[in-house]
Image (cartoon, rainbow, N blue to C red):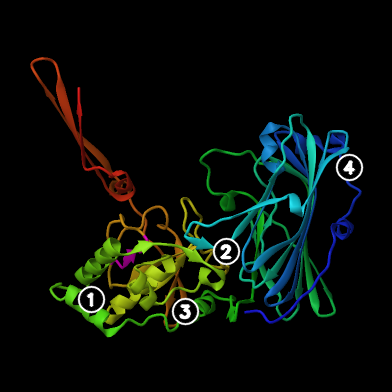
Amino acid sequence: MYKFTFLVILSLAGLSNVYPQSISYDLNSIPDSIKKNASSVVRSESIEFEITDIDRARLYVHRVVTVLNESGEHALLFQEQTDKFESLEDAEIKLYNAAGKMIEKYKQKDISSVSIGDGLIDDAKFYYKQTHVSVFPVTIEYSYIKRYKGIITYPRYEILTPEEGVENSTYKVRVPKDQDLRFKEKNIHLSPVVTEQDKYKTYTWTVQNLAPVKYEEGAVSYESRYPSILLAPNHFKLDDYEGDMTSWESFGKWYANLKQGADVLPEERKKFYADLVKLAKDDLEKVRIIYNYLQNNFRYVSIQLGIGGFKPFSAQYTDEKKYGDCKALCNYMQTVLSSLDIKSYQALINADYNREPVDPAFPCNQFNHVILCVPRSKDSIWLECTSRTNDFGELGNFTENRNALMITENGGQLVSTPKSKASDNTFNVFTSIVLNENGSGTTTSFMKGTGEYRQDDSAASGQSRL
């Protein structure tokens, strides 16, 4: 992919020179309004995201956090994720006691890493270091650098987390003028200071003395409640695929380009599917038959390597192997339907329980899943192609009531996915009890679930002795 060579030699000693060292560890200097109801306080945070080209950038992070009590112990965990496009270049962790004396120090070689991913093969890695203490308060200092070789998402500015006060925090983005960037405030009114020098433009956001926000169990997702700044590129590049993100339409065109040539099936397989649905009375029944066949004969296997996180396997490969991830299975289903002259569209979506729909007014990549839509004049059909248990035409709380980016002939089009009603999600148990004259007996139970509860319908019946 990349023929551009970039060599940087940066020691940890150099890392310490990048960030300011005059940081107070005195708890008495923290305003009471910040300490009250806080389990931790960000004493100083400096984040710099330097973009040098459409697919090249570096992220510099320096963060000092005082952990006040055991409830803030999560702040003692260093964690960063990497993949083919992002690498951890340098890291250093220091721990200080209440008096400000350094008691522990770790370098990058001391940080553990594991391969992660929800599939069979994934090139993502998770770096972590958990620091344990028995006495509070303590202060932890993180310094690290990440390097980007391919960019589709800019790191957002997470200003505040639950039960955390902030003394000082700065987020700075340096970007070539001809690229520029887009940003959106979330749950805060905070304008950046914008300066220009030579061919670069710099955006700087700064906050001071923010009181903590109380954590509420079962509250809306974090992006709906806590303050942050969303950032997005105008133009981006992964591998050799360059794209435009200034509109949903143009972003959809980029994704459509990734799957060009992946929609071809051998003639004998086309004939197989034509024979499979030859007795169907209409297109709706044909789609149902194909979907049920897919559920019974194909399985979900996730393989995410480089651009493979976005680019699907070809339909022919999926047909041969009888497996694929969400992109591959949707692409396969779409290819089969196309061979039967039934139109369908892949749709990108931000899947997970209780996720906030993507903002129609701010095109950016917040998607992590692909589903399929079969448009109809009334009640279009939405299909979860990775599930072997979902009822035909049902999505569930993983993807329902969201804004999905449907990939059409004219690019991306943001559309709403259906939402279920309470009556669509039921769980019924029918139990009969037979008592014998000697006092013994048996019970027989039959369980039936619909909608979300269908996942619990693992056993149609059960019998036990009393």
Circle 4 SS class: loop
Tell me, yes or no, whether the two marked residues, 4 and 3, touch with CB atoms within 8 Å: no
Q: Residue at the spot x=70%, y=46% of the render?
A: 129
Nearer to me, 417 or 71: 71
- Which residue is outermost to the left? 437
Name the disc covering residue 273, or none. Answer: 1
Tell me, yes or no, whether the two marked residues, 2 and 3, touch with CB atoms within 8 Å: no
Q: Please tell me which of labels 1 and 4 falls first in the chain.
A: 4
- Left or right of 222? Residue 442 is left
Q: Which residue is mark 2?
A: 123
Q: Amino acid at mark 4?
A: Ser
Q: Residue at the spot x=33%, y=72% of the render?
A: 333
Q: CA distance from mark 1 to mark 4?
A: 70 Å
Q: Residue at the spot x=37%, y=54% of the render?
A: 396
- Left or right of 53? Residue 379 is left
Q: Which residues are magenta?
A: 379-386
Q: Which residue is mark 4?
A: 24
Q: Amino acid at mark 3?
A: Ala
Nearer to me, 306 or 445: 306
Q: Is residue 384 visible?
A: no
Q: Is residue 189 visible?
A: yes
419 above or below 27? below
Q: Please tell me which of labels 4 and 2 falls first in the chain.
A: 4
Q: Which residue is mark 3?
A: 256
> The N terminus lies in which quarter of the figure?
bottom right
Mark 3 nearby-residue class (10 Å; few <14, some 14–19, many ≥20)? some
Q: Position of residue 332 (x, y in %)?
A: 35, 73
Nearer to me, 324 or 61: 324
Circle 3 SS class: helix
Q: Position of residue 290 (x, y in %)?
A: 25, 69
- Which residue is outermost to the right? 22
